[in-house]
Image (tube, rainbow, N blue to C red):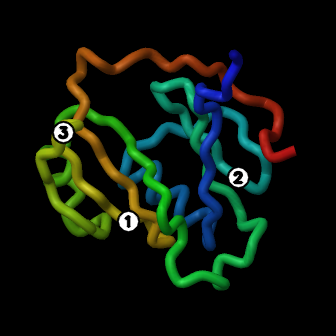
Amino acid sequence: MLAPTQLGFVSLQVSDLETSRRFYTEVLGFQLLPSSPPDAYLFATQSGALFAIRTPIVDLQATSQLGWGVSLWFGMPELTAFLERQHGKAHLIRGLQATPFGNTAIIADPDGYWLTLQEVPATQRIALLRPAITANPYE
């Protein structure tokens, strides 16, 4: 039986696109893809799924907690060193913690979305699987 089991795309609707772009590129070190639609920024990932931030298509002020109940995890090597470099640049929700999935920490982005950072050994990292996207995935 065929089932939709491959994650292809995740996006966050953000209140200020440029503030969020700076957070994801300058604080977290994400790499922008060469082409993005005018109302969004697409980022390169190493898992094959695309990640984007975009202007809102819903009223973000209609809720007190954006993304409540959704977990976004981003793998990275050397989590402790990363957290030390980013001290004061990102709001730390939960510091370094050993879990059944390895060491994790939770930070918040400028809109308050919680992002779980998971330490992944460099040997588990894989090459970028997606080519640059030229079409708008929101259409």
Q: Residue at x 19, y 53 (%)?
A: 83
Q: Residue at x 78, y 66 (%)?
A: 57
Q: Which residue is mark 3?
A: 100
The amino acid on which the numbered mark 1 sits, given as a three-letter code, is Ala
Asked whether disc 3 touches disc 2, contact meaning CB atoms under 8 Å apart, the reply is no
Q: Position of residue 11 (x, y in %)?
A: 62, 50
Specify few, some or many for label 3: CA neighbours under 10 Å numbering under 14, 14-19, or 20 or more.
few
Q: Quadrant of residue 73?
A: top left
Q: Which residue is mark 2?
A: 40
The amino acid on which the numbered mark 3 sits, given as a three-letter code, is Pro
Query: Marks 3 and 2: which is nearer the front?
Result: 3
Q: Which residue is mark 1?
A: 108
Mark earlier in primary sequence (2, 1): 2
Q: Position of residue 59 (x, y in %)?
A: 72, 78
SS at badge 2 = strand
Q: Quadrant of residue 93?
A: bottom left
